[in-house]
């Protein structure tokens, strides 16, 4: 099973949902992982984030409730 690594710079969790930065989303080349990105659901904080529903390796992701 493939996972992406997320840290403070490229990932955020809001209310239990995971969002990845647009730059990180564009860097993903795996077809399986690309299907887990939802560009329609997005948030903008310091940069734009899109919803990601796949598995992650938490390397210090920011968490907001």
Image (cartoon, grey):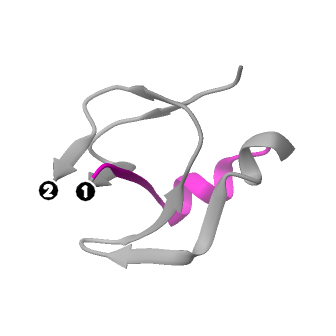
Sequence-wise, the earlier of marks 1 and 2 is 1
Query: Tag on residue 15?
Result: 1
Q: Is residue 56 visible?
A: yes
Q: Residue furthest right?
A: 31
Query: Would you say 20 lies left or right of 54 here?
Result: left
Distance in Å between CA atoms under marks 1 and 2: 5 Å
Query: Would you say 38 lies left or right of 58 here?
Result: right
Q: Report the quarter where the N terminus lies.
A: top right
Residue 19 picture location, percent across and down: 42, 57
- Vertical arrangement, residue 10 with respect to residue 58, above or below: below
Q: Which residues are magenta?
A: 16-29
Query: Would you say 41 lies left or right of 14 here?
Result: right
Q: Secondary structure at mark 2?
A: loop
Dots 1, 2 in contact, CB < 8 A = yes
Query: Residue at 21% across / 45% down in the picture?
Result: 62
Tag 2 residue: 65
Q: Quadrant of residue 38?
A: bottom right
Residue 6 picture location, percent across and down: 41, 36
Query: Residue at 54% across / 53% down in the picture?
Result: 52
Crowding near pointer 1: few (<14 within 10 Å), some, many (20+)?
few
Q: Secondary structure at mark 1?
A: loop
Asked if the stretch drawn in magenta spans residue 24, the answer is yes
Viewer-side residue, 18 vs 30: 18
């Amino acid at each position: 099973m493939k996972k992406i690594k997320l840290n403070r710079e490229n990932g955020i969790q809001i209310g239990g949902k995971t969002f990845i930065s647009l730059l990180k989303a564009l860097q993903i080349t795996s077809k399986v992982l690309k299907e887990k990105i939802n560009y329609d659901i997005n948030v903008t904080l310091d940069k734009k984030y899109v919803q990601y529903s796949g598995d992650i390796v938490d390397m210090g992701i920011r968490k907001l409730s």
